[in-house]
Image (spheres, rainbow, N blue to C red):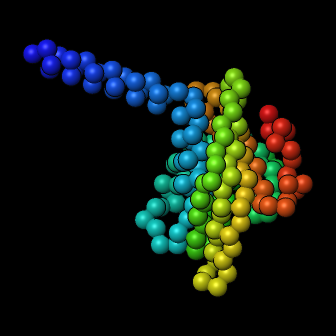
Amino acid sequence: MKRILLLVIVLALLTGGYFVFRNQDKQQIGRQVDQLIENIEHKKISLRKPSDVKTSLEAILADEIEFFGAPPVPSGTHSPDDVIDKLATFHGFTTLCEIEEKSRDIEINGDEARVTIEAEVHVAIGKNLQKRENWTMMFQLKKSDVWRISGIKGTPPGNASSARDASDLF
């Protein structure tokens, strides 16, 4: 009987610890960025519907998203609908977009956070036109009711001057 009670207590502590860990800001921020990257990634043959991508992005994007970067990253301030339309256009002319993350750094400053990701981006337009580049991607998030992405910066190698300095995101 004591073993069963001890087992129940241990399971309750583990379950409680999991939910406390899962709801920490750093974990929530990481999930929001992961969800954005999953929506950017694309394969021509996919079961994911554009309406699913739209619903997913509406849940994680702020009312205004500021972009900085070299093409194909759009610059300026955009609404979530603009971002969704631009992503649908991007998916329409590419056959593949894969993002292989190499490193990730999360900095939290009160109700604002910045995630910096070093990644290899592989984009293909058909079989003959493929490109692999190492990119630095930065995501600014702000917390209201939940963490939402409010800024995106994408910089390929050698183009650091085409995007604002990372400190400008805060």
Percent across and percent down for residue 102 are 62, 54
Q: Write the residue at 90% across / 54% down.
A: 161
Q: Is residue 120 visible?
A: yes
Q: Is residue 92 visible?
A: no
Q: Is residue 62 above or below residue 85?
A: above
Q: Nearer the viewer, residue 85 or 154?
A: 154
Q: Nearer the viewer, residue 6 or 64?
A: 6
* Quadrant of residue 146 within the rendered picture: top right
Percent across and percent down for residue 111 are 68, 25
Q: Nearer the viewer, residue 44 or 108?
A: 108
Percent across and percent down for residue 24 are 53, 27
Q: Write the residue at 61% across / 81% down.
A: 126
**Residue 67 as seen in the image, left or right of residue 160:** left
Q: Is residue 56 above or below residue 51?
A: above
Q: Is residue 14 above or below residue 114?
A: above
**Residue 81 as seen in the image, left or right of residue 15:** right
Q: Nearer the viewer, residue 53 or 130?
A: 130
